[in-house]
Amino acid sequence: MRAGVVVAAQPGVEDLAVRAEELGLHSFWVNDSPMVHGDPFVALSLCAKATSRIRLGIGVTSPALRSAPAAASGLASLNALAPGRIICGVGTGNTARRTLSMRPTTAARLENFTAALQDLCAGRATEYREGDRVRDVRFLHAGAHVNTADPIEFVVAALLGPKAAAVAGRRGTGLISFGLLDPTAWHALHDTRRHAAQGTPSDPDSHTDSRADSYVVTALHLLDEDEDPHGDAARDATGHLVLSLLAFAADTAADTSALAEQLGPEEREAVRRLLDRRGTTPTAPDRHTKLYPNYLGRIAPQDRDLVLPSLMNTLALVGTRDDLLARITTLEQAGVDELLIQPVIDPPTEMGRLAKLLTDE
């Protein structure tokens, strides 16, 4: 299986991209959550100039963050700096919207946004709407300004499950998912994508990338001999994923159909403790300002008790070399093409362990 890395935009991110390329990793992604991280287009511009081979991904942008013309301009500009190496993840803007205390957008708007980006980034005109006003738009400058000749790879974030997979099938894109390590769920997503694609006519004029790869974002911790799989080191390496899920569950706990209602008693108790610890409630209008600071960053030692073994095992890969390779093989058999780790403790070292694990398999 291929390997890549996901990081937050921050000064020095290009040095991590260079190291990832040196290690032979396939892709380097930057998050797009404006209120908690830096700007991914700025970060990837630096990475594009500092690297020559590794693919560079936005993970992920949304119509709830940027208009299609603005996002397409950023992507095509990156494509001019790193021709044919750009990947654009698109989603409903779950985290990026919730950090503003707003709801994510819909699958329909996501599909329209994806289609517009595909058109614009391939040099075609697309329909652009603001309220009742609708016009065809296209790039009015090309050449040295933007690159619409080399293909950009698009992937849809699978947070909406079958709805997102259907969008990916109709638009001919790949999929990306956060912490989805269940092979059965991946088989279902791929079945939905294939079914949705069957009735979609091919576009002979399309210049977008024909690949439809699947990516999973997770954390990886290779256990030392006799190391506790749920000890402090393992919790520190995976806790950012667990706390991100707990924060989402806490944020939506007032909704009876939300994630919190799908969790077990121990996990629901962890959600309650997180809310108490952050000094907020599921209905507080400013809860987003208490739940999301340091989102996907290294956890504090006092929060280790919230990193439950059940959630570690669900969202992250923790185990011996043989354990990890067995789980990775199962994911590969389920159609996952690339494993993306999100390191927070020591990114260069964690990237090196990932590269060695998959190279030596």
Image (spheres, rainbow, N blue to C red):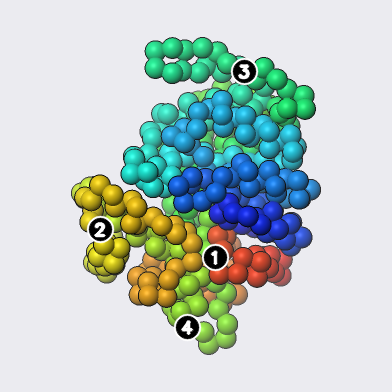
- Badge 4 crowding class, 10 Å Cα cut-off, few under 14, some 14 to 19, many 20 or more, is few
Dot 2 corresponds to which residue?
280
**Is residue 36 found left or right of 23 in the rendered image?**
left
What number is the disc on residue 30? none
Q: Is residue 308 left or right of residue 22?
A: left
Under circle 1, the secondary element is loop
The circle on residue 228 is 4
Task: Check disc 1: other Cα within 10 Å, few if <14, some if 14-19, many if 20+.
Answer: many
Which SS class for mark 3? loop
Q: Could you tell which of marks 4 and 2 lies nearer the N-terminus? A: 4
Q: Nearer the viewer, mark 4 or mark 1?
A: 1
Query: On the image, numbered disc 1 is attached to which residue?
Result: 344
Task: Give the residue type at disc 2.
Answer: Thr
43 to 205, vertically: above or below = below
Query: Residue pushed farthest bottom?
Result: 226
Which is nearer the eye, 216 or 136? 136
Q: Are marks 2 and 3 in contact (CB under 8 Å)?
A: no
| Residue at the disc numbered 3 | 138
Real-space Cα separation, disc 4 to disc 1, in angstroms: 20 Å
Tell me the residue at 70%/49% (across/down): 47
